[in-house]
Amino acid sequence: MEISVTHDVFKLAQVFTISRGSRTEAKVLTVRVTENGVTGWGECVPYARYGETLENVTDLIEGVKGPVTRAGLYTLPAGAARNALDCALWDLEAKKAGKRAWELAGLPAPGPEITAYTLSLDTPENMQAQAEKNAFRPLLKIKLGTPDDMPRLDAVRAGAPKSTIIIDANEGWSAEVYADLAPHLVRLGVALVEQPLPAGEDDALIGMERPVPVCADESCHDRASLPNLKGKYDVVNIKLDKTGGLTEALELRKAALTEGYKVMVGCMVGSSLAMAPATLLAQGAMMTDLDGPLLLAEDRKQPLNFDDAGIHPPTADLWG
């Protein structure tokens, strides 16, 4: 078994801004695992918020010596390195077996799922313009996370009066800001709020009224995160780069649903290869947010199909 990793860069269609900063390109790692002439591949997006860089994630991947199994990858921490390797092994197993990945996972064949489209943080005027341009989309996600977000939210609702709106504060609010905004979220028909408070300060959510469902993102990585979410969150956002791959993500989904949480399936900004395994997780989820490829100016040669029905599962030529 041979394992290789390459650095790839995909230009974004426009500047993408959240409360932690802006970017103009998606920098990803592509991992290929080859065994007996068959190659499976996967993609990860190292995330600085979790102390990951292209360099240290590459070192983790290159430190793995084959042969390796998906179960054996649990020696790595949950995160980007394990994700790319895990997804590459799923792809490899599917190709060797002549089956699709969802068959190997014991899942029904997936179908399309409506996905959110993300509007990045900007001035109220520019966010309204973004909303107007994308008002045909049924589900919009807006990046907020500053103390003066109310004008932005009003502007987006004015620009897209018929779209369902979800908010991602990216840990940018205080408990006071969130409590002040909560009634307005209801008034404006917001369907979900992601990570309003910093992960280390979210105990403030205990006992606080949640008129709109609150989703754990930075506070939820894998199954080990679940005990600390009780009383704070209604939904968990499952991302492959947080769980460390599809294997753990499937287990997290099962455990979260068993404990009464609803599930959102999200992504980092990456290519269709990064989204492909997540389409298996998205089946029947409360919310799907796999719009990474829609934010790119360029994508993989076998991109995922997006249409009015949503994001479609990958062809075998892309993954799984």
Image: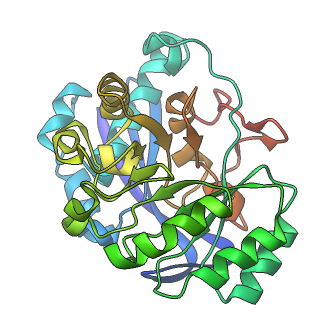
Q: Is residue 14 above or below residue 300?
A: below
Q: Is residue 234 left or right of residue 213?
A: left
**Visible residue check, residue 249:** yes
In-image side of 244 versus 271 (left or right): left
| Residue at 55% across, 17% down | 100
Instruction: Identify the residue at horizontal 34%, vertical 48% (top origin).
Output: 233
| x and y, in percent, of residue 186 in the image | 60, 59
Could one spot residue 9 in this view of the protein? no
Pick the front one: 311 or 180: 180
Residue 150 appears in which quarter of the rendering?
bottom right
Residue 166 in the image: x percent, y percent? 60, 57
Task: For the C terminus, give its image quadrant.
Answer: top right
Total numbered circles:
0
Asked which quadrant contains residue 25, the reply is bottom right
Please tell me which residue lies in front, 31 or 297. 297
The residue positioned 46% from the left and 16% from the top of the image is 96
Q: Position of residue 270 (x, y in %)?
A: 54, 58
